[in-house]
Image (spheres, rainbow, N blue to C red):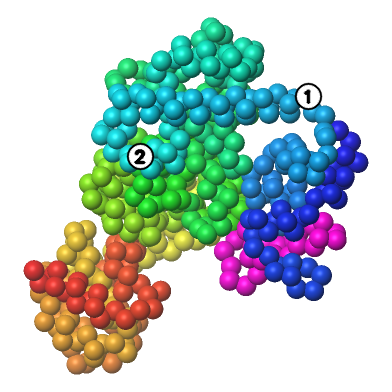
């Protein structure tokens, strides 16, 4: 393959036509413009020039030719991009290795079709999906789920169409027994790439036999660590938010409940480099792993791997599910609203670190607090990106200073403010924060705040801040008054940040009318 061959493919391809199928373009002068596929924006900054055969994104600096576009935006390999464009342009290329790849794609396509038809004739496997997993028939069809029961019949059909050596190369037949289907008596899940081609399969048993899950063995086109299940959704430009869950059955169930932007690793630990690669295409990633110990540990491990990578520049957030729940269980327990809310308010990396360290900082034991400081130091030392390291170090230095100041002031007034993390305390704190930080709304909500049934220290704070002498005081003046009495709970950033996330009206970013939400919050406190 020569450079002349590549240039011929580029020159005989309409770059506008190819890109317009993904990014709607409008002509302005000699160029075409559209919204950037690399970031979320409202004003088009993405330019395409047909004559020069190039694109340029003014908001991100990304640029290149039509092959680069397919690689950067649609996830193609160089060879796949070149072959697809050559085929459309009627140019014959001669890659022996790519011919074998095409045969493997054909084998996988037929195998997927056979598995799917087989499922519809397998009552046991179909009942498992419909009754046990509670997938509906539309979902089964959408993900083209299948079954590998009656493997002998499947083997015969495949051997009638392809040579044994190619079936082994595709991973469909076993390498140790090359006349036998690799998968037997399993629910089959096709793994499809961004070009809608089948790369391989995942298989799950329906009983307690082990291993529960297996995937196609590594092949020329199936590199498990580089693939995410359902990655074809990355071609859709309507949503820039991607949710990472643990397994393909989580993805399938969440799709059925309206979460149409989920991906999952193929039974391996999550490849952090793959996630960083996706963020470079303008996607925001939300990691939502199971709420059990294994899921929590996997989340922290992923965070560590991200921080240790010099290419990590944020854009990845985290959701911590309720203890021992996975996404499938949440939606099946009629808790979809809770999941939507958690995903809508994910934790940034610094908030995840704060949450992780909470168990150390809430302890009154000096050894535990010391261990927490060592863990934080280790996390910060692990950060490879110099700018990010500086930002997070400054962030946690400020938190440490604020917590020390808060403790010293509390001691000086001989008052100990023991914060509770129950819902009523958080709602009470949210109302107080809103009243203090919104001077223009104080008169409007005064009666509601003054008559609410606050308890303990929050009642003491409320009674203090509604005094006439403080009614027109600034936010800083009121917080200084609370500081002097050891009552400024906002110094505990973990607590106050959680309050602001839980009650949107307490957030400075809230731009809607807060009155109805405040009324509901007070109704809960008074109940």
Residue 235: horizontal and vertical position, in percent?
58, 50
Q: State the extent of the magenta-drawn residues as a range.
A: 34-61
* As drawn, 234 above or below 112: below
Residue at (86%, 50%) from the top-left corner? Answer: 11
Q: Nearer the viewer, mark 1 or mark 2?
A: 2
Residue 220: horizontal and vertical position, in percent?
65, 25
* As drawn, 523 above or below 109: below
Is 410 magenta? The answer is: no
Q: Nearer the viewer, residue 419 or 86?
A: 86
Residue at (78%, 68%) from the top-left corner? Answer: 31
SS majority, magenta: loop
Q: Which residue is mark 2?
A: 137
Residue 303: horizontal and vertical position, in percent?
47, 45
Q: Secondary structure at mark 1?
A: helix
Q: Nearer the viewer, residue 429 or 416?
A: 429
The answer to whether the residues at label 1 and label 2 have Cβ atoms under 8 Å apart is no
Q: Is residue 348 left or right of residue 96?
A: left
| The C terminus lies in quadrant | bottom left
Q: Is residue 76 left or right of residue 253?
A: right
**Mark sitting on residue 418:** none
Q: Secondary structure at mark 2?
A: helix
Kindly tell me whether residue 213 is visible in this rendering. no
Q: In terms of image quadrants, where is residue 29?
A: bottom right
**Mark sitting on residue 96:** 1
Q: In terms of image quadrants, where is residue 120?
A: top left
The numbered mark, 1 or 2, whose residue comes first in the sequence reads: 1
| The N terminus lies in quadrant | top right
Callout 2: 10 Å neighbours few (<14), some, many (20+)? Answer: few
Q: In terms of image quadrants, where is residue 484?
A: bottom left
Residue at (32%, 90%) from the top-left corner? Answer: 440
Residue 290: horizontal and vertical position, in percent?
34, 41
């Amino acid at each position: 393959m020569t450079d002349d061959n590549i240039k011929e493919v580029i020159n005989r391809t309409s770059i506008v036509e190819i890109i317009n199928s993904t990014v709607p373009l409008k002509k302005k002068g000699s160029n075409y413009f559209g919204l950037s596929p690399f970031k979320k924006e409202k004003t088009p900054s993405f330019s395409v020039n047909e004559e020069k055969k190039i694109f340029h994104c003014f908001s991100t600096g990304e640029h290149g030719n039509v092959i680069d576009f397919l690689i950067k935006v649609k996830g193609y390999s160089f060879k796949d991009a070149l072959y697809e464009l050559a085929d459309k342009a009627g140019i014959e290329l001669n890659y022996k290795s790519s011919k074998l790849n095409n045969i493997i794609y054909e084998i996988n396509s037929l195998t997927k079709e056979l598995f799917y038809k087989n499922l519809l004739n397998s009552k046991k496997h179909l009942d498992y999906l419909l009754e046990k997993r509670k997938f509906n028939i539309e979902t089964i069809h959408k993900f083209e789920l299948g079954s590998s029961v009656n493997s002998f019949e499947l083997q015969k059909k495949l051997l009638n169409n392809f040579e044994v050596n190619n079936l082994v190369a595709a991973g469909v037949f076993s390498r140790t027994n090359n006349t036998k289907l690799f998968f037997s008596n399993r629910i089959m899940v096709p793994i499809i790439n961004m070009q809608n081609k089948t790369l391989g399969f995942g298989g799950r048993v329906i009983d307690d036999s082990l291993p529960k899950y297996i995937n196609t063995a590594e092949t020329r086109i199936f590199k498990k660590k580089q693939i995410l299940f359902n990655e074809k959704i990355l071609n859709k430009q309507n949503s820039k938010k991607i949710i990472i869950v643990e397994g393909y059955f989580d993805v399938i169930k969440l799709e059925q409940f309206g979460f149409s932007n989920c991906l999952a690793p193929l039974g391996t630990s999550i490849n952090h480099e793959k996630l960083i690669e996706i963020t470079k295409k303008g996607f925001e990633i939300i990691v939502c792993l199971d709420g059990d110990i294994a899921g929590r540990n996997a989340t922290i491990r992923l965070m560590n791997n991200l921080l240790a990578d010099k290419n990590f520049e944020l854009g990845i957030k985290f959701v911590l599910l309720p203890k021992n729940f996975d996404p499938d269980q949440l939606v099946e327990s009629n808790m979809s609203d809770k999941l939507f809310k958690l995903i809508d308010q994910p934790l940034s990396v610094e908030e995840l670190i704060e949450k992780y360290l909470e168990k150390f900082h809430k302890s009154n034991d000096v050894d535990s607090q010391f261990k927490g400081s060592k863990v934080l130091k280790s996390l910060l030392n692990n950060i490879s990106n110099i700018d990010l390291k500086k930002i997070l170090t400054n962030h946690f230095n400020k938190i440490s200073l604020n917590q020390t100041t808060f403790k010293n002031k509390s001691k000086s007034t001989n008052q100990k403010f023991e914060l509770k993390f129950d819902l009523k305390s958080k709602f009470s704190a949210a109302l107080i924060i809103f009243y203090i930080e919104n001077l223009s709304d104080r008169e409007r909500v005064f009666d509601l705040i003054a008559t609410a049934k606050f308890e303990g220290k929050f009642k003491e704070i409320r009674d203090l801040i509604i005094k006439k002498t403080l009614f027109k005081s600034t936010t800083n003046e009121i917080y200084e008054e609370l500081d002097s009495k050891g009552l400024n709970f906002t110094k505990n950033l973990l607590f106050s940040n959680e309050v602001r996330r839980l009650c949107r009206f307490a957030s400075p970013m809230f731009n809607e009318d807060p009155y109805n939400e405040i009324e509901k919050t007070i109704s809960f406190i008074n109940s």
